[in-house]
Image: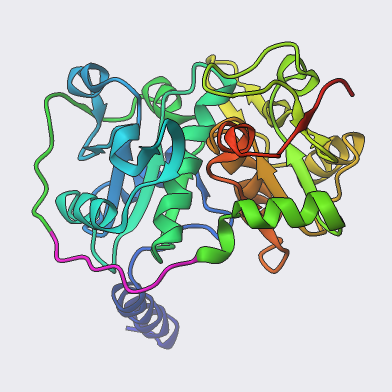
Amino acid sequence: MGKVSAFAVKLAATALIASFAWGLDAPSNKIVDVAWVKANLNDKNLVLVDIREGAQEYEKGHIKGAVKWLLSNFREERMGVPGYIAAPHVAQTLFRHSGITENSVVVFYNEAKHDYDFSLPTTALLMAEYYGFEKTAVLNGGYDAWVAAGGEIEKGREHPTPSDFTIKKFNRDIVATTGEIDEIVTLGGKQLIDVRDDLQFDGKKAHPKSAKVGHIAGAKHFFIYELCRKDSNGAYHLVLDKNYINERAARAGVDLSKPQVWYCNTGWDSTMGWFITKYVLGYKNVYNKDYDASLVEYTRLPSRDVVKGK
């Protein structure tokens, strides 16, 4: 064997050892595509989480090996307000039953028939990060893109080996409290960003559980689904063009490089804004929070008013 060939073999062996040492990893922007999932589908550290809302869709067909989560598994209602992160013991049990370990990379996917389908995976991802688990990603194009690309499908229900996953820290700096919203409304200094549609922002319609119509005083209006596009197969994808994202934000009077808090009705759609700023744009050191209880909670609080119109 020549010197070049011997070197090539040694280099390949080194790379193989390194791959075992470091294990599976997701891109820094936490967005994976169908090709990435196909390439890593049989990796023991990959955990796919099917987050489509109906249980029947999952049993009729899901990505090979994916486990099933429902919204109620990682969100909870408190005193009629639906938009709270699930309790720690609930989240920990969910991770254990899903076979998630400290070495896992968890990829969330929804269907992608609508522009709003992207927000459910980012909501689950925020919950995971809140409880200290950050090796996560979202499948761009979701289940629809997987099917269109001929990805392997299984039926029935997966039964992963339970793990001993334990919550070791809380990332409280990603979720805003009512006190922080009061501070922004009173003192300013941070951008309060409302991601809902025009009718809700203007106060012409409201979530059924909101006590008032309109938006929080001083909020900027940035309809977050402007950042989703449909591909030729009909599956929606999150736009990854940073210039486009910043341009659309600027039109709304928002500078995503500066401190911000996102809200919607129940802290679900707003997780998209949090996710895009932190991971797609890469502003990981910017004050960037999601108000998980959002407007439903805020409108029910005494002495907090909302504003109608532009």
Quadrant location of the N terminus in the rendered image: bottom left
* Above-or-below relation of 174 to 153: below
The percent coordinates of residue 251 (x first, y second) are 91, 34
Q: Nearer the viewer, residue 35 or 253?
A: 253
The percent coordinates of residue 173 (x first, y second) are 58, 65
Work out which residue is located at the far front of the displayed protein and give it. 302
Q: Nearer the viewer, residue 106 or 225?
A: 225
Q: Is residue 113 visible?
A: yes
Position of 273 compared to 161: left or right? right
- Quarter of the figure with residue 13: bottom left
Q: Nearer the viewer, residue 255 or 227?
A: 255
Overall secondary structure of the magenta section: loop
Position of 173 compared to 157: left or right? right
Residue at 87% of width from left, 35% of height from top? 252
Residue at 89% of width from left, 24% of height from top? 310
The percent coordinates of residue 79 (x first, y second) are 40, 36
Residue at 57% of width from left, 31% of height from top? 296
The percent coordinates of residue 11 (x first, y second) are 40, 80
* Above-or-below relation of 299 to 36: above
Position of 24 compared to 197: left or right? left
First to last magenta residue range: 163-171
Residue at 34% of width from left, 78% of height from top? 9
Position of 67 compared to 53: left or right? left
